[in-house]
Amino acid sequence: VDQFNASVKSEWLTGGFENAAPTETRYDPYEMQDLWTEKNGSFPGYNCRITAFSLFNEFVTAGVDQPETQGEDSLFMDLETLAADPAVLCGDSTSKFCALFASVTAADTTEVANQVKALQTGWSERGISFEDSSARLISVVLHDRFSDTDNTLFIGHVGVLLPAEDGSLYFIEKVAFQEPYRLVKIQNRTELSDYLMEKYDTAWGQDTTRSFIMENDELMDGYRPNPLDSAS
């Protein structure tokens, strides 16, 4: 966090909680990316998956027979960071990181319920399981279908959900490689769904499943498609 904040303009960051629309920012992401590159060279930085894994890895396990890397076609930038800074995994393995985040084979459908089962099956085959904890992994799952043989589910965004003392919730995320860390306070999971879906539920009307949200290895209670989409 300190490295990132020192690499960008302070006026682009908040000094505490502020009310804002999900897509509203203080910064231009392209200008922020240029400044990050100017100060950090070709090092890509840290994204949502690396950040969430470093916070949550002790609550997830993977099979011992997983390859050292997999999913390189979609995780190539993640792997570039992990090769440059393996310590960011907090003593855990690249093998487990890839087992969790590499894409899995999708179902031949656009129904969310069927894709949830496909993701669960893919994770089960890799030995992925989640321990019971007050911390929860929140994953936005995207469906990519380029052909009959290239049909996959991929975690396009992920963060960690924590309970607040007043009964509300905190969502911890790294917005993107060259965008800030963010702590979002919401009242319930439906509000979290609306926050995430406004940002990531953008592929409706195609022959793919709409983005959906997993809480650990189950569909998140309170999930719903983007409420601002008039087609929903």
Image: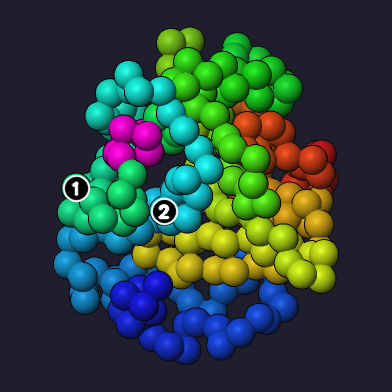
In the displayed structure, does residue 87 sit left or right of residue 100? left
Q: Quadrant of the N terminus?
A: bottom left
Sequence-wise first label, 1 or 2: 2
Q: Principal SS element in the magenta part?
A: helix
Q: Which residue position is annotated with label 2?
A: 54
Residue interval drawn in magenta: 93-98
User: As displayed, is residue 28 above or below residue 112?
Assistant: below
| The quarter of the displayed image where residue 115 is located | top right
Residue 121 in sight from this viewpoint: yes
Q: Which SS class for mark 2?
A: helix
Question: At x 19% / y 47%, what residue is drawn?
Answer: 83
Residue 129 spot, x, y in % from top left = 54, 29
User: As displayed, is residue 19 above or below residue 79?
Assistant: below
Residue kind at label 2, given as amino acid type:
Ser
Residue 206 spot, x, y in % from top left = 63, 28
Q: Which residue position is annotated with label 1?
A: 83
